[in-house]
Image (spheres, rainbow, N blue to C red):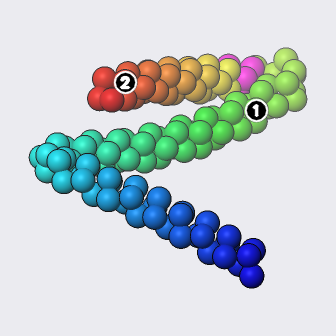
Amino acid sequence: MKKKNKFLFKIKQQHDKLKEELEQIELQTKNIDPEALKRVQELIANYEKAKKEENERRTTYKNEKTQLEEEITKLEARVHASPEDNTEENDKMKQIEEQYKLIADRLQKQRLVMVKYLFYSSLKKKLNF
């Protein structure tokens, strides 16, 4: 019986403590400026939107990077596959090398764009918060 009473007493104490905390929170929230609260909610919504857009861009950039790397791998395989002296083949090889350079440049540009975006988004987050 004593254990039961002790247990009930502890539960009652916890209940009273939580009730007191709830009352304090309610008092604090009454003093909050509704305009400030609205502004904070807007900032949070903007942050969530920016975060979502950033994730979408990252996914897009990752997919493009993967495609470009696959294309580069295929072109490299073609370049190393046939080292014949045939002039027609040499012309093809030159075209492949040019394509490889273009794709490598595009990949590098995508990397730079991603770095710039990440830098600006982190800077924006720091300035807003």
The quadrant in which the N terminus is found is: bottom right
Residue that mark 1 sits on: 73
Query: Which image quarter holds the C terminus?
Result: top left
Above/below status of 45 relative to 78:
below
Outermost residue toward the bottom in this view: 1
Q: Which of 64 and 47 is in front in this view?
A: 47
| Alpha-carbon span between mark 1 and mark 2 | 39 Å
Tell me residue 110's x, y (percent). Answer: 51, 27
Name the residue type under label 1.
Thr
Question: Quick one: SS at disc 2?
Answer: helix
> Mark 2: few, some, or many residues within 10 Å (few <14, many ≥20)?
few
Q: Which residue is drawn at 71% across and 38% down?
A: 70
Determine which quarter of the picture holds residue 65.
Answer: top right
Between circles 1 and 2, the one closer to the viewer is 2
Residue type pointed to by label 2: Lys
Q: Can residue 124 be seen in this view?
A: no
- For residue 112: magenta? no
Vertically, is 89 above or below 60? above
Q: Magenta stretch?
A: 90-94
Of callouts 1 and 2, the N-terminal one:
1
Closer-to-camera residue (95/123): 123
Q: For residue 58, which numbered disc appears in the image?
A: none
Relative placement, left or right, of 87 versus 103 is right
Q: Residue 6 at x, y = what percent?
A: 68, 70
Q: Residue at x 85, y 24 (%)?
A: 80
Going 81% across and 22% down the picture, which residue do you hit?
86
Residue 40 in percent (x, y) is at 25, 43
Instruction: Check disc 1 and report its element: helix, strand or loop.
Output: helix
Query: In the rendered image, is residue 104 in sight?
Result: yes
Q: In this view, does 32 lie above or below 104?
A: below
Write down the residue under mark 2: 126
